[in-house]
């Protein structure tokens, strides 16, 4: 049986991905801060492992990975997904606390999870595994007034490339999925704000969050001799090509 640990598993893309992997028979580690929400995802599923932890807490992250590998036996895949989108604004309007929060969750949190996964995959027998980082199309083309989110997602692309290179001697593959406008609470919040600001505005094109989850499943299911280095999955009509 294959195993995966998913960060940010309590809602949005993380939750949809966790539910799909559980349906497919994987053993799934559910990591997020809200234990009650994780228990909802895990309800009635023997192959779900609830791991309440804050991805910005190094000790908590390490303990969660140790607990998961102790229960599951090994770690085949990490879906490094946890992230936040702070309030929009030009750089002079962005609160420093929002900048630090974005860097702490979107970059430091993903670094800590990847670090724990890499160590586990390097030490286990058979050696190896796969890390899938959730980037964003903002890693390529930003939305206006999104400097913290955009900067951290560009950094994730660099992290992905470094992990891909450093993982080769240990049979650890790393890829990145860049998702555009999946219908999650974060996107629904953005749409609601745009509608409130301008009732006549054209609302963003979106896609079902389950399509993002299916894309992660494809990446995770490959043999270690193959890797999706970068994948973009997005709402077909969203203004990505040509936006800037």
Image (tube, rainbow, N blue to C red):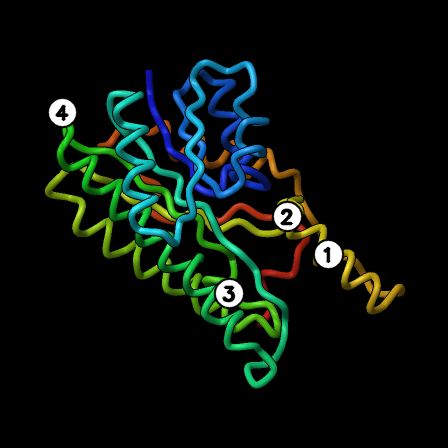
Residue occupying image coordinates x 51% and y 32%: 214
* Disc 1 + disc 2, Cβ < 8 Å: yes
Q: Secondary structure at mark 2?
A: loop
Q: Which is more foreground, mark 4 or mark 2?
A: 4
Return the disc, 1 or 2, that comes first in the chain's sequence: 1
Residue 100 got which mark?
Answer: none
Q: Position of residue 235 (x, y in %)?
A: 64, 48
Label 2 sits on residue: 235
Q: Counting other residues with Cα less than 10 Å from the Cα at mark 4, is it few (<14), some (14-19), or many (20 or more)? A: few
Give the image quarter of residue 217.
top left
Quadrant where the C terminus is found in the figure: bottom right
Q: Which mark is residue 204?
A: 1
Distance CA(mark 1)–CA(mark 2): 9 Å
For label 4, the residue is 125
Marks 4/2: CA distance? 40 Å
Crowding at mark 2 (Cα within 10 Å: few <14, some 14-19, many 20+):
some
* Mark 1 in CB contact with mark 3 (< 8 angstroms): no
Q: Does dot 4 land on a helix, a strand or a loop?
A: loop
């Amino acid at each position: 049986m294959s195993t995966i640990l998913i960060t940010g598993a309590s809602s949005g893309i993380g939750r949809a991905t966790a539910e799909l992997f559980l349906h497919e028979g994987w053993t799934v580690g559910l990591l997020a801060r809200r234990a009650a929400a994780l228990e909802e995802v895990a309800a009635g599923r023997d192959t779900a492992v609830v791991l309440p932890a804050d991805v910005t807490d190094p000790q908590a992250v390490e303990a969660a990975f140790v607990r998961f590998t102790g229960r599951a036996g090994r770690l085949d895949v990490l879906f490094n997904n946890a992230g936040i989108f702070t309030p929009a604004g030009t750089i002079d309007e962005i609160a420093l606390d929002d900048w630090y929060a974005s860097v702490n969750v979107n970059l430091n949190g993903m670094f800590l999870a990847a670090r724990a996964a890499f160590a586990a995959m390097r030490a286990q027998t058979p050696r190896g595994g796969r890390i899938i980082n959730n980037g964003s199309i903002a890693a390529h083309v930003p939305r206006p007034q999104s400097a913290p989110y955009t900067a951290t997602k560009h950094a994730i692309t660099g992290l992905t490339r470094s992990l891909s290179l450093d993982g080769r001697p240990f049979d650890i593959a790393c890829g990145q999925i860049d998702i555009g406008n999946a219908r999650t609470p974060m996107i629904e919040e953005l749409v609601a704000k745009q509608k409130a600001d301008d009732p006549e505005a054209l609302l963003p094109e979106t896609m079902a969050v389950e399509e993002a989850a299916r894309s992660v499943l494809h990446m995770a299911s490959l043999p270690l001799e193959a890797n999706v280095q970068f994948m973009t999955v997005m709402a077909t009509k969203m203004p990505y090509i040509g936006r800037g």
